[in-house]
Amino acid sequence: MRESGRARSSGGRTSSRTRGGRDGEESAGRGRIARWIVLVALALITTAAVLVFFTPVLGVRSVQVSGTEVLDAGRVSRVASIEEGTPIVRVDRAAVRERVTGISRVESADVRLVWPSTVRIRVVEREPVLFERVSGGVRLVDDDGVGFAEVPEPSRRMPELRLPEDVGEQRTEEAITAFTSLDEKVREQVRVVELDGSGGVRLLLTRGRTVEWGSAADSELKAAVLPALLTRQGRVYDVTAPELPTVS
């Protein structure tokens, strides 16, 4: 009876060792599979990174320019200087924007990457509101006081900006502020925006009328007072003190 018990005990130990060996083999097998999966995943990630960052597979195929009215879209594209085939993820949007806004007529630019192979550039062109005379023609000026393009002649209704030589930027801004504060009907009557000898703004209107504007202070109030004032007969309309405007 004792021998039989020992036999059973011995057989049980053998069975346990067998199961342990099988479990160890299965665990090792799973470990090898996991390592292969990791290696394959790393290989795929590396290959994808190389394709995206260092090859023309996902490179720029087209540059689309919109928003141009006066400017030539082809010129904007050339200035953007995006080489065909450049991996799209390596396109420096800030650098492209800086190059495009270096065009004097461009006020702002938006650069977007459209996968897999397109760069879209939308520009906003400067709008001229005044012009100033320069040698050989005229320079267009926008509502920020930026002179951005020279042309032979301005449009017929565009007012002239007359500034003394070496005038400071602040004075130029005051003249622009005065003009841009006006409503559309009054703007249509303005022929010249100038700075007088004391640095105040003066507007020369149609029919020989003059508006003494003064500084840019209270420009909104001055612009609100002026339309009603212009309904009165006179030659000089003084809104330097908009609470007490005068006509003479």
Image (cartoon, rainbow, N blue to C red):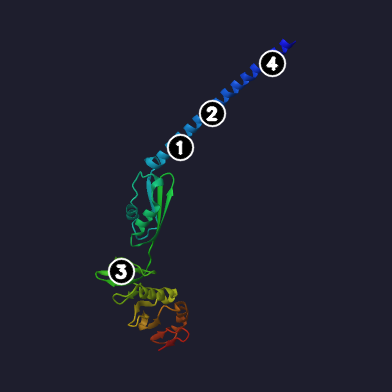
Callout in the foreground (4, 1)? 4
Of the pair 159 and 121, the residue shown nearer to us:
121
Name of the residue lying farthest toward the bottom: 248
Q: Please, what is the three-letter code of the amino acid marked with disc 4?
A: Ser
Residue depicted at 37% across the width and 49% down the height? 63
In the picture of the structure, the residue carrying the numbered disc 4 is 9
- What residue is disc 1 on? 45
Report which residue position mark 3 lands on.
Answer: 139
Q: Amino acid at mark 3?
A: Arg
Amino acid at circle 1: Ile
Residue 66 figure quarter: bottom left
Relative image position of residue 104 (x, y in whole percent) = 33, 62
Report helix, strand or loop for mark 2. Answer: helix
Circles 3 and 4 in contact, beta carbons < 8 Å: no
Q: CA distance from mark 1 to mark 3?
A: 55 Å
The CA distance from mark 2 to mark 3 is: 76 Å
The mark lying in front, picked from 2 and 4, is 4
Q: Residues within 10 Å of mark 1 (few under 14, many from 20)?
A: few
- Give the residue at the far front of this rendering: 2
CB atoms at circles 1 and 3 under 8 Å apart?
no
Residue at disc 4, secondary structure: helix
Residue 31 is tagged as 2
* Rendered-image quadrant of the C terminus: bottom left
Asked if disc 4 and disc 1 are in contact, CB closer than 8 Å, the reply is no
Q: Residue 122 in the image: x percent, y percent?
A: 41, 56
